[in-house]
Amino acid sequence: MSQILGGVGLSAGIAVGALLAEQTSGSARWAGLGGTFQILGAALIAIPMSRLMAARGRRPGLVLGYGAAALGAVGLVTAGVVGSFPLLLVSSVFFGGAAASTSQSRYAAADLATPAHRARDLSTVVWATTVGSVLGPNLVGPSAPVAQWLGLPTLTGPYVFSLLGLCLAIGFLLVRLRPDPLVEARRRSMAAGLDAGPVHGSVSRGLRVVAASPGARLGLVTLALGHAVMVSVMVMTPLHMSHGDAGLQVIGLVISIHILGMFAFSPLTGMAVDRFGGRAVALVGSLLLSTATLLASASPEGESLTLLAGLFLLGLGWSCTLVSGSTMLTAALPAVERPGAQGASDIVMGLTAALGGALAGVVVDRASFTVLALIALGVAVLIGLAAAVSATRPRPAPA
């Protein structure tokens, strides 16, 4: 339930984020910065989240992320009202807490999972995001009369729904996430005589641990590059469509189909990882992302079936890289090192995508959406090369 509600909170504003940034900044050149700062915020908020989770469990860490996002949603509405681009950027950083929490929730699913079904359990929580994340962008149309009723600019309407979804997600976590999965996993480990010392939440230590493990390194590369490809193309798609006079409802539909690809098939992805291994699914993800970026590069401005298909495959390829990369990283590490390493991986993933999002606006402004998609194609190919040349077989870590 928290993933569903958090998905609404996170995705309701995705379809209009670039448009609001363009409106408040006055230039398409800066349109990608709102999404970029949101991704940057997700990476930054992951630092205190990891430490808090290691010390007190998953529940307070996830609540921290959603609470920051709720504050950011209020700031984004205010930025739209007063027309302040700096306020929009600052608020976007806080709003990134929603992405941090929905991302870290997948690891909460793996806390008590058996090694044979770790990817399946992880992907099930990723799948739960589908309902909220597909519903969110489709609230763009209904949000217009709500914004008018409240006396707000039209483009801020979706963030009103975001605020509601985030507050409800916090409520469900506080009331229903009991027992805390990370705390319970620790208790079971100690009861079984497998206590290996304190749980580590330091992201700097986490990076060193990941760097020392070939399996974890491959998982991190898969996560970071896959996320960068998806974000860089996705954040500029609404602008590409808007410049071809596509309406907000059509833009919302395309983003919904994209998010459907991201989450709806994740259980199948998880089962494939459990059956065939993370490297094989990472290769499939690379192929899907490559096809998606080729289709996007060939799409005209406005609405088109080519772009719709490309955005769906972009989401599906991202799902493959997310589930396979997360599973490879988790499986390669001992339980006490996972919170810090998982937090570090999300930070690297977020910063890589933030760079991609920042450059995306500049590339589209100075060249075109087609050039952006072709650059993303090159990054997608790198994922496949990394998986193909890797001879690692991540060892099962202690539960």
Image (cartoon, grey):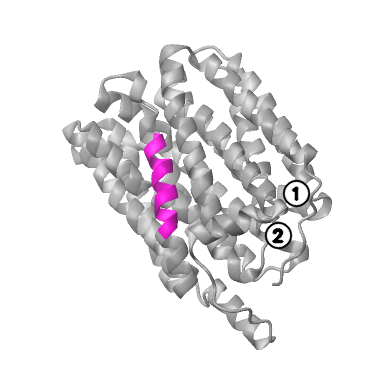
Q: Label 2's element?
A: loop
Residue count near mark 2 (Cα–Cα under 10 Å), binned few <14, some 14–19, many ≥20: many
Q: Quadrant of residue 80?
A: top left
Q: Nearer the viewer, residue 36 or 393?
A: 393
**In the rendered view, does 330 fall on the left or right side of 161?**
right
Kindly identify which residue carries mark 2.
332
Q: Nearer the viewer, residue 179 or 342?
A: 342
The amino acid beneath tag 2 is Ala
Question: Is residue 43 magenta-colored?
Answer: yes
The amino acid beneath tag 1 is Gly
Checking the image for residue 278, the label placed there is 1
- Residue 336: x and y in percent read 60, 71
Residue count near mark 1 (Cα–Cα under 10 Å), binned few <14, some 14–19, many ≥20: many
Q: Quadrant of residue 31?
A: top left
Q: Earlier in the sequence, mark 1 or mark 2?
A: 1
* Image depth: mark 1 or mark 2 in front: 2
Tell me the quarter of the image containing the C terminus: bottom right
- Residue 131: x and y in percent read 54, 48
**In the rendered view, does 174 fall on the left or right side of 344?**
left
Q: Is residue 356 above or below residue 327?
A: above
- Residue 103: x and y in percent read 52, 53
- Find the distance from the CA under tag 1 to the CA under tag 2: 11 Å
Q: Is residue 331 in view from this perspective?
A: yes
Q: Is residue 309 in view from this perspective?
A: no
- Taking the spot 43% from the left edge, 61% from the top edge, the residue there is 49
